[in-house]
Image (tube, rainbow, N blue to C red):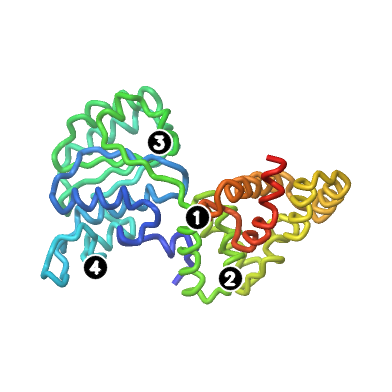
Amino acid sequence: MSYEVFAQKWRPQYFRDVVGQAHVTATLQNQIRSERLGHAYLFWGPRGTGKTTVARLFAKAVNCLNPQQETDLGPVITGEPCNECDACKEITQGSSFDVREMDAASNRGIDTIRDLRENVKLSPAAYKYKIYIIDEVHMLTTEGFNALLKTLEEPPSHVIFIMATTEHAEIPKTITSRCQDFDFRHLIPDQIISRLQLIADTEKISADSEVLSLIARQSEGCLRDAENLLERLVTSTGKDLVLANIEETLGLGSSSLLYELTEAIVGRNLNSGLAALNQLSVQGMDLTQCLHYLITYFRDLRLLAIDNQLDELIQSPNLNFQHSRKKQNKFQLIG
């Protein structure tokens, strides 16, 4: 079997496995259970937060040949795909004729949409619904959007459109008004860390909370980025992930030097600050990353200075909490 990268291997196969988007998955499952499906959906939000994954899950769930699943209350429609029937397997493998995925970035012209308009008139080849998943839909040309309008407003009853975009503001109002909007949100660090911990445990990767916190910060709320970064680090340094090695691999410099720099800034010690910054530069740290670190760190200090009970909003690793608490009184003085 060919090697699968973590982002593909760990792609959710059930709605319940989707991280951080319960407000979306719960609504979609309710629609599936009640058979009150829309004809057009618009999934929008940051990259790597599950838009295409949820679109595929929805395509599987509405075409699943075994919608009733056994529970403690007997057989019920859960709104989850069974992942065992022919429909679920074909959609998972990307071989179903009834689920078509389009990349609007490379198929953005009016001719592509005209072909789509002709194809939607045809009945599904094997299952109940034909699903059109249009990724990066904001890349369509004005002519392409105009050609899509009428079909999107009154498609045949066997067709469902799911459009995904990272640029909601660039979608014409005439399109959004014909869709059900679902906003996908950045994941909080704890959600990413929990998922990374599951992957690490299963893949027999040694990574403590400091390492996972660092990866979560670097991903900026994007789970796919976090999974890809974890894989890159395993490839570079092996399955025994150590914080110092990771900082060197990512060009982040050492934690002690970053602490020295923040201490110098809080204490207004120009000489120490310049010395620490120079040493970070000598070690090859990306100074843009250094700036991002400082912004996040001082944000956390401000939160702790306001109220010690705001720990759940802290983005810095747990390693920094005790260090931060020692500084918060100083920060109140200079804030």
* Tag in front: 3 or 1: 1
CB under 8 Å between callouts 1 and 2?
A: no
**Between discs 3 and 4, the one toward the N terminus:** 4
Residue 207's tag is: 2
- Chain-order first, disc 4 or disc 2: 4
Residue at mark 4 to residue at mark 1: CA–CA distance: 39 Å
Residue 49: which numbered mark, if any? Answer: none
**Where is the N terminus found, in terms of image quarters?**
bottom left
Q: Quick one: 245 or 208, which is closer to the camera?
A: 208
Q: Of marks 2 and 3, which one's residue comes earlier in the chain?
A: 3
Spatial CA distance of label 4 from label 2 is 34 Å
Q: Which residue is mark 4?
A: 84
Q: Quadrant of residue 253?
A: bottom right
Discs 4/2, front? 2
Residue 312: which numbered mark, if any? 1
Q: Residue beneath label 3, please?
A: 107
